[in-house]
């Protein structure tokens, strides 16, 4: 029949048009910001720094190795190493800044971090009237607890915690002294081989 494809296409369009108003699961808009869609676990916006414990400064996992700074494609990460009074470098960042106006949310910093110190956040409401200083996030802005990480990415955080616990157990096993030999075994002389004639 001539024009059958056009009629089928128009019928499908009409069905979708009516369905978008009558079927609740097909409604694509919400009354934001009063209503919000739940954020999926694999969603990512910009990086943040993970700290353990209650003190965001002492518990910071970052050791200022600067791998993320070197690997960042848009070069939006800026790190200065902490030094003591004598100038000796400490395993801690004095400055850790990320310019989110430049960040492309590629997650390369997360992938290259050997200490599980930097992760991707889900916060996207970062609009500001100051596009320079307002979008430059400092260490105090970036530092968030491991509890927060568990809240936004529960599966990933559990895997990271298990991995870190396994590494700590390995290090503890290496550092532990070797088990002492039994008392009887130490006093026994080693057997002397006898040559056969």
Image (cartoon, rainbow, N blue to C red):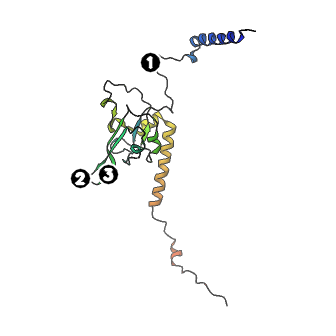
Which residue matches tag 2?
Answer: 85
Pointer 3 residue: 90
**Position of the N terminus by quadrant:** top right
Q: Is residue 88 above or below residue 32?
A: below
- Cα–Cα gap, marks 1 and 2: 51 Å
Say what secondary structure mark 3 lies in.
strand
Vertical relation: 116 (above or below) 186: above
Determine whether the residue tagged by mark 2 lies in a helix, strand or loop: loop
Q: Indicate the quadrant where residue 132 lies.
A: top left
Please name the residue shown 57% across and 15% down the image. 24
The mark that comes first in sequence, 1 or 3, is: 1
Q: Which residue is mark 1?
A: 32
Q: CA distance from mark 2 to mark 3?
A: 11 Å
> Would residue 14 appear left or right of 52 to someone viewing this image?
right
Residue found 51% across the figure and 78% down from its top: 187
- Residue 157 position within the rendered picture, expressed as x and y whole percent measured from the top left: 48, 40
Give the left or right position of residue 18, taking residue 50 as reference.
right
């Amino acid at each position: 029949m001539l024009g059958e494809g056009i009629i089928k296409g128009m019928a499908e369009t009409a069905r979708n048009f009516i369905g978008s108003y009558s079927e609740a699961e097909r409604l694509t808009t919400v009354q934001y910001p009063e209503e919000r869609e739940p954020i999926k676990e694999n969603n990512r916006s910009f990086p943040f720094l993970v700290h353990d414990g209650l003190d965001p400064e002492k518990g910071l996992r970052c050791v200022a190795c600067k791998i993320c700074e070197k690997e960042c494609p848009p070069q939006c990460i800026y790190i200065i190493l902490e030094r003591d009074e004598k100038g000796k470098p400490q395993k801690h960042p004095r400055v850790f800044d990320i310019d989110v106006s430049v960040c492309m949310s590629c997650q390369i910093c997360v992938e290259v971090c050997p200490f599980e110190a930097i992760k991707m956040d889900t916060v996207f409401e970062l609009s500001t009237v100051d596009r320079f200083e307002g979008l430059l996030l400092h260490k105090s802005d970036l530092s968030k607890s491991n509890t927060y990480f568990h809240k936004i990415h529960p599966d990933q955080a559990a895997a990271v915690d298990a991995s870190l616990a396994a590494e700590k157990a390995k290090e503890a096993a290496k550092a532990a002294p070797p088990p002492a030999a039994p008392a009887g075994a130490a006093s026994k002389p080693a057997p002397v081989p006898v040559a056969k004639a």
